[in-house]
Amino acid sequence: MDNNPKNQDGIEQESIVGQIPDDPLTGHAYDGIQEFDNPLPGWWKWMFIGSILFAFPYAAFYHGGAEGRTATERYDKALAENIRLQFAEIGELKMDRATVVKFLYEPTWLRVGQSVFKTNCVSCHGADGGGLVGPNLTDDAYKNVKDIGDILHVLENGAAGGAMPAWKTRLSPNELVLAASYVASLRGTEAADGKPAEGRVIPPWPEAPPEEASEAEEADEDANADAMEMDAEKAAT
């Protein structure tokens, strides 16, 4: 007598799937397929239990209210330390129009201003400066700014009756200057979903200071001199 079950085509199941284990069945059947009652591996069950037990001390440590333990607080601390190290290179900046203009044309330091902006300003102005509660910073129209130096003044003292908070007691002078330069750099960029222009269109920002331009010219001259020297060496060989 043939004890091997057969499928609907009369082919023995053993020849298709191999030896059928002699394990208990759950009694469930899905489209004619029965389910074996196989237990989960022991390592899997213990790993699951361990993850539950680990969750309690983890939650107590990181979410128990102790200062400086959350991921956001640790990130802010690391960011502040990094900014302090960077500021050691430039000292304390003058909080004036000329300094804002100078750092507008220094991409390395603009990235520091971007960090300050993203930490403190995106909730009102959006990550790309397109505006949320606050105005769009990417167009040519401004509500409280007539000149690039006014950006620093607004950051320091606030505007619109407190709708724009004063940051002079929360940020260092260097952070204020570099944030002002970064805000100025957003002008003319494209925001993903920018608000309509508010205020009045103002003149363009001033060009790079003469000393910045002369440094660029010196760099070009050095590059040209190096190229001429290399050409001469090739010709000699």
Image (cartoon, grey):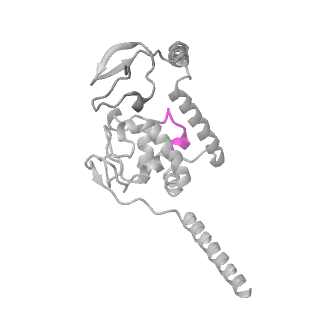
Q: Which quadrant holds the N terminus?
A: top left
Residue 177 appears in the picture as rendered = no
List x then y, in percent, for residue 51. 52, 17
Q: Which residue is at the far right?
A: 237
Q: Quadrant of residue 27?
A: top left
Residue toward you, 59 or 162: 59
Q: Quadrant for the C terminus, please.
A: bottom right
Taking 125 as reference, is 43 left or right?
right
Decide: is 4 above or below 146: above
In the image, the segment drawn in magenta is: 168-177
Res. 118 image quadrant: top left
Residue 44 spot, x, y in % from top left? 52, 19
Q: Which residue is drawn at 58% across and 71% down?
A: 217
Q: In this rendering, is residue 80 above or below 178?
A: above
Q: Does the magenta stretch include residue 102?
A: no
* Whether residue 211 is visible: yes
Outermost left residue: 196
Q: Residue at x 50, y 17 (%)?
A: 48
Instruction: Work out which residue is located at the far front of the displayed protein and give it.
Output: 1
Residue nearer the viewer, 155 or 220: 220
Left/right of residue 227 with respect to residue 113 in the rendered view? right
Q: Residue at x 55, y 50 (%)?
A: 109
Q: Position of residue 50 (x, y in %)?
A: 54, 15
Residue 235: percent from left, percent from top: 70, 87
Q: Which residue is drawn at 52% across and 27% down?
A: 71
